[in-house]
Amino acid sequence: MSNRELDAAGIPDALMRQSYLACKELNRSYGKTYYLATLLLPPGKRPYVHALYGLARYADEIVDDMELDASPAQRAELLAAFSDRFFADVAVGSSDDRIIRAVVDTIRRWDIPVDHFRAFFRSMEMDLTVSRYQTYEDLYTYVYGSAAVIGLQMVPILEPTDPAAYDKACQLGVAFQLANFIRDVGEDYARGRVYLPMSELEAFGVGEAELAGHRVDDRMRAALDFQIRRVEDLQRNAEAGIGMLHPSSRDCIDAARILYCGIAEQVRTIDYQVFTTRATVSTARRLSVALPAWRRARAARRRYGPGNVHGITDASAEGR
């Protein structure tokens, strides 16, 4: 993160700047597509989005990092300790943790409801105890906290012009998560989890035996295509929400929509071979989306300005 971005965001404190830099590094290292889309935002808004991603990634690593030598019970203890510290620090408005510090600052500046973070940590806890979801409604309980609330956290930073933007952001977050679940069927199964509704898979004749046998036949193709069409429906419904954001924020979210949901389409391209091939959006495709979006985003900033890049500040927040 450049000094220009931190300056534009109104973050002068050296320790706070280091915290935002640590969050940015997590975003750049793990969230390739997400990071690319973030660069389309006005410089002064990028640090706050990095902070939100940093928290989500840090918690996810506690749950899923394969290099962490810890049992599920130990992971649960680590997650609980991190969650307790996070909410305690939010309550007092400051933190000594290098990741939490930036997130607390972001929450205060943008008045982000803390309940969104409670839902997020509940879903992270579910990852340690739940390996199957029988219905879409069951899965949605998890997805709401793991993905939908990430969109809801971001909306204040993107400056909505219509309250309906929150519902659209929720739908888009769910679409992103489902696209990842479809792509990662093989990887998730290897970790002992299935993130597609079992009742819907079984409706197409796909059960535990087919998953365990890595069997991709017409039944599996139909089951996966059903989920891909759900992603397509969600993103179509959510697309109108992009126009409800500040003009300087729209191209970031639209690029993310195209690239993330494009993962699901790539599963079709690889003939649904999710057990042996990882569906990816090519670098050429990313650039073909990102470069025109970057030009549009710059034009929008010139015409409409960057919007509010400091968030909601009060006397206690001044000068941080």
Image (spheres, rainbow, N blue to C red):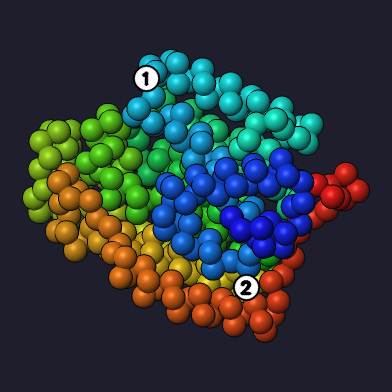
Mark 2 surroundings within 10 Å by alpha-carbon count, few (fewer than 14), some (14 through 19), many (20 or more): many
Q: Nearer the viewer, residue 32 or 181?
A: 32
Q: Is residue 267 visible?
A: yes
Instruction: From the image, state whether disc 2 or disc 1 is nearer to you.
Output: 1
Q: Nearer the viewer, residue 134 or 240?
A: 240
The percent coordinates of residue 211 (x first, y second) are: 17, 37
Q: Is residue 87 left or right of residue 254?
A: right
Q: Residue at x 12, y 40 (%)?
A: 214
Q: Quadrant of the N terminus?
A: bottom right
Q: CA distance from mark 2 to mark 1?
A: 43 Å
| Disc sitting over residue 100 in the figure | none
Q: Amino acid at mark 2?
A: Ser
| Disc sitting over residue 69 in the figure | 1
Q: Residue at x 17, y 44 (%)?
A: 275
Q: Is residue 290 left or right of residue 184?
A: right
Mark 1 surroundings within 10 Å by alpha-carbon count, few (fewer than 14), some (14 through 19), many (20 or more): few
* Image quadrant in which you'd find residue 222: bottom left
Residue matched to label 2: 248
The percent coordinates of residue 271 (x first, y second) are: 14, 58
The total number of labels drawn is 2
The percent coordinates of residue 20 (x first, y second) are: 63, 46
Q: Is residue 91 left or right of residue 119?
A: right
Q: Nearer the viewer, residue 223 or 48?
A: 48
Instruction: Kindly state the secondary structure of the residue where label 1 is placed.
Output: loop
